[in-house]
């Protein structure tokens, strides 16, 4: 097999582009010691890099009595492969390195051990032939990955196919394994094909150069599955791997579903399970449909403040009411017409430029200014006719904040403002619309719902919790019947809760709602509620700690 053209330099930038982040010694040692158990073990590292895992494999095999262990690896970058060969030799091993795209290497079930740190390339940067090859490789294992899958997902599946029956796979994977929808097929594959699955989770980020959190996957007994549980270890950081405590056994109802529940004390999840089973809680999709907001192609051009509208001389027929870009103004229970007026007075963009019919002379002038500035060449503008007419969505009943430093919020859209894609719209079922608009934003401020938001959402850089519409569909909410049964009590506290939110006192507001919906209703004991609150605080702290440290 011929080698790709030589690349003379391997900079940090080049490594990041191909998803290579070299692994701390504490992690390579831990995985290798777990995976290699006898002198007869055969080892493959499918993303060899500078041989961090292969060097540890040589050490481990020599400890088991091999004099000059042979270890195999695949590396796409010629310079890294040369470095890897030399490092393995220096460690006392015999390297067999193949320079190639791993997805082009035909799998042979000949190894007892596969270890490594697969490349992490986000789907936005993972395209063309590379993506096609990766999805084809996963299909050989009967796994169909979506076009949104990052590189590691196919890499994990393809790696397993090199294992002999009973083989072991130890990989460093993004924590996305636990939470993203596209990883559902990977999660199912692991439970279906392996006899046991272990995970090590970290409370601190262990890769200083990478933005993503990681987990360690330790899968044993290939083709001896399925298993019905995973064993979960918690570690503070890489150095704590030598002192892991007692593990947690976690049994998911559906292995393909998100695994974020394993981060939560089972005692804290039990109240939610009980509340759902009794019909007191349900999912948000029971109330209605959650959708993405409108995409303008250029918010600075299309979203206008009242002062800007006046300066441009635009008329009312050129405009529609708009919830301003972002969601900072949606931290209360209601977006009212008065609130929109106050936002406009603060120079917020409360109007969307969207002329209909024959634009006014002022609109014509603004359209021409946009053309001269190249706004019409932006992708979303370029593909629509006319470019300046943003596709409309009807005003939603509720607005859902999808990027949150604290917790997602539902806000009643009394102003009937249109919304952009910085928030989601919730369109309530007709039979629940009146009840939902009046009380669901208030009722959603309970500890069970807040905890579940951390479980169904995903954490992003800066400690932000994001909810996509499909994730929001599963978000636990008080059921319509339960809200009806507590309606008078909720109405009695609504004004007080609104005041607390206005002053940023979320915890006090949640306490009031908890009392009405949970404890006074006799559904949850104080002890159970405390467990829920503790678990929510722990998950929030885990997420926001990285934000405070800038990681």
Image (tube, rainbow, N blue to C red):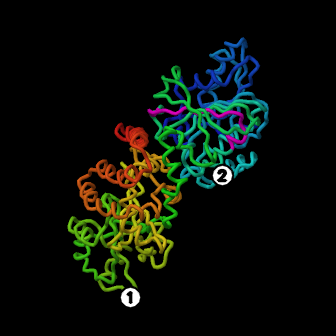
Q: Position of residue 33 (x, y in %)?
A: 63, 21
Using the rendered view, name the quadrant where residue 199 is placed.
Answer: top right
Asked if marks 1 and 2 touch (Cβ < 8 Å), the reply is no
Q: Is residue 120 left or right of residue 224?
A: left
Q: Badge 1, how many Cα within 10 Å: few under 14, some, many 20+?
A: few
Q: Is residue 372 left or right of residue 261?
A: left
Say if 473 sits above or below 428 in the image: above
Specify the segment rendered in magenta: 189-205
Q: Position of residue 258 (x, y in %)?
A: 57, 47
Q: What number of labels is visible? A: 2
Is 196 one of the magenta-colored residues?
A: yes
Using the rendered view, name the quadrant where residue 500 is placed.
Answer: bottom left
Q: Position of residue 82 (x, y in %)?
A: 63, 28
Q: Residue furthest left?
A: 345
Instruction: State the CA–CA distance, disc 1 to disc 2.
Output: 47 Å
Q: Is residue 426 left or right of residue 110?
A: left
Q: Position of residue 122 (x, y in %)?
A: 54, 48
Label at residue 60: none
- Judge by depth and name the residue closer to the eye, 399 or 58: 399
**Residue corresponding to mark 1:** 358
Task: Determine the secondary structure under disc 1.
Answer: loop
Of the image marks 1 and 2, the number of the one nearer the N terminus: 2
Q: Quadrant of the C terminus?
A: top left
Label at residue 145: 2
Q: Badge 2, how many Cα within 10 Å: few under 14, some, many 20+?
A: many
């Amino acid at each position: 097999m011929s080698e790709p053209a030589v690349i003379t330099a391997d900079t940090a930038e080049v490594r990041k582009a191909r998803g290579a982040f070299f692994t701390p010694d504490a992690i390579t040692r831990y995985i290798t010691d777990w995976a290699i158990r006898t002198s007869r073990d055969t080892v493959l590292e499918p993303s060899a890099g500078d041989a961090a895992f292969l060097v540890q494999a040589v050490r481990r095999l020599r400890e088991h009595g091999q004099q000059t262990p042979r270890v195999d690896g695949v590396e796409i970058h010629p310079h890294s492969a040369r470095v890897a060969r030399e490092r393995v030799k220096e460690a006392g091993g015999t390297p067999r390195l193949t320079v190639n795209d791993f997805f082009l290497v035909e799998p042979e079930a000949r190894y007892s051990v596969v270890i490594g740190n697969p490349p992490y390339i986000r789907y936005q940067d993972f395209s063309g032939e590379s993506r096609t090859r990766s999805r084809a490789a996963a299909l050989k294992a009967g796994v169909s990955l979506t076009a949104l899958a990052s590189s590691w997902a196919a890499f994990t599946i393809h790696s397993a196919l090199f294992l002999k029956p009973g083989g072991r796979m130890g990989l460093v994977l993004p924590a996305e394994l636990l939470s993203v929808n596209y990883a559902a097929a990977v999660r199912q594959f692991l439970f279906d094909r392996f006899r046991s699955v272990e995970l090590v989770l970290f409370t601190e980020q262990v890769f200083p150069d990478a933005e993503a959190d990681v987990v360690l996957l330790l899968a044993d007994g290939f083709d001896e599955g399925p298993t019905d549980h995973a064993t979960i270890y918690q570690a503070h950081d890489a150095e704590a791997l030598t002192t892991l405590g007692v593990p947690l056994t976690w049994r998911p109802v559906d292995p393909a579903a998100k695994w974020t529940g394993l981060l939560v004390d089972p005692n804290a999840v039990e109240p939610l399970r009980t509340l759902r089973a009794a019909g007191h809680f349900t999912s948000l999709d029971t109330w209605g449909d959650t959708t993405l907001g409108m995409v303008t192609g250029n918010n600075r051009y299309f979203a206008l403040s009242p002062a800007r509208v006046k300066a441009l001389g635009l008329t009312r027929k050129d405009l529609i009411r708009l919830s301003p870009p972002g969601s900072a103004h949606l931290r209360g229970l209601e977006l009212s017409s008065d609130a929109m007026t106050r936002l406009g007075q603060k120079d917020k963009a409360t109007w969307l430029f969207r002329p209909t019919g024959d634009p006014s002379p002022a609109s014509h002038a603004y359209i021409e200014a946009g053309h001269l500035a190249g706004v019409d060449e932006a992708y979303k503008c370029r593909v629509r006719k006319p470019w300046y007419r943003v596709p409309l969505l009807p005003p939603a009943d509720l607005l859902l904040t999808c990027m949150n430093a604290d917790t997602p919020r539902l806000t009643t859209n009394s102003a009937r403002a249109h919304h952009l894609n910085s928030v989601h719209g919730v369109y309530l079922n007709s039979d629940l619309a009146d009840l939902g608009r009046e009380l669901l934003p208030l009722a959603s401020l309970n500890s069970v719902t807040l905890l579940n938001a951390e479980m169904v959402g995903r954490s992003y850089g800066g400690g932000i919790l994001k909810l996509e519409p499909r994730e929001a569909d599963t978000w636990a909410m008080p059921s319509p019947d339960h809200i009806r049964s507590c309606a008078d009590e909720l109405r009695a506290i609504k004004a007080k809760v609104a005041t607390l939110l206005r002053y940023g006192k979320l915890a006090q507001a949640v306490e009031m709602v908890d009392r009405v919906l949970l404890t006074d209703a006799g559904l949850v004991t104080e002890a159970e509620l405390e467990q829920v609150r503790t678990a929510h605080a722990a998950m929030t702290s885990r997420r926001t700690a990285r934000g405070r440290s800038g990681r």
